[in-house]
Image (spheres, rainbow, N blue to C red):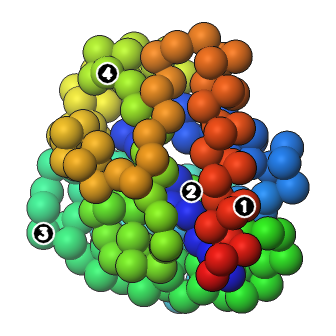
Amino acid sequence: MYIVGLTGGIGSGKTTVSQFFLNNNIEVINSDAISREVVQPGTIALAKIEERFGAEILTGSKTLNRPRMRSIIFKDEDQKDWLENLLHPLIRDAINRSIACAKSDYVVLESPLLLETDQHKLVDRILVVDISPKTQLERTLSRDGGSKDTIKSIIDSQLTRSERLNRADDVINNEQDIQSVQSEFESIHRNYLILARQK
């Protein structure tokens, strides 16, 4: 199976581009969705997180309080490392199971941390959705709310724009109008169909 890794910083428009793939009958594996699944109530991972951080890391309905968890890990590198060591192998295993079940011409792995984790080793090609840091901050604030400082911490924890672009095989510029983004996507999609047939 030919696998495309789709990545970009927070607020870059990965979801929009993923929808283009879905509209063209290409399966998209969303690592964020998988990361939520592995910490559902009743999972070993959530029990270990509660054991480490206490009951206050859970919401009233006993799910992971993601904003609280995020604020902890983006301020404490040791806690972040511990959480990543717990979750990343579980996420990777679930991604591999999803890839094995995929039936489309190729499959897309959408992951904000594709290049920061070993998930990039799973893919044949890397597609980056790119926007300026200013637009990234504005979009994330309007979409998620939250504090500017927390969002800046998330941005700072990810690869820089130039690092991401240097590792990209393909780039979609998401600063332009949606028709231009769609046009870039269509060209890239045609190329991926060719590459998938050659694998």
Q: Identify which amino acid the numbered label 4 is placed on.
A: Ser
Q: Is 180 or 36 nearer to us in this picture? A: 180
Label 3 crowding class (10 Å Cα cut-off): few <14, some 14-19, many 20+? Answer: few
- Marks 2 and 4, how far apart in space? 20 Å
- Marks 2 and 3, how far apart in space? 26 Å
Q: Identify which amino acid the numbered label 2 is placed on.
A: Glu
Residue 110's disc number: 2
| Dots 3, 1 in contact, CB < 8 A | no
Per the image, the residue denoted by label 1 is 193
Q: Is 151 or 193 nearer to us in this picture? A: 193
Nearer to us of marks 1 and 2 is 1
Q: Position of residue 167 (x, y in %)?
A: 28, 55
- Marks 3 and 1, how far apart in space? 42 Å
| Dots 2, 3 in contact, CB < 8 A | no
In the displayed structure, 38 sits above or below 191; it is below
Per the image, the residue denoted by label 4 is 132
Q: Position of residue 64 (x, y in %)?
A: 52, 60
- Marks 4 and 3, how far apart in space? 30 Å
- Marks 1 and 2, how far apart in space? 18 Å
Per the image, the residue denoted by label 3 is 78
Image position of 136 (left or right of 165): right
Can the viewer see residue 40 in this picture? no
Q: Is 101 or 107 nearer to us in this picture? A: 107
Image position of 157 (left or right of 89): left
Q: Identify which amino acid the numbered label 3 is placed on.
A: Asp
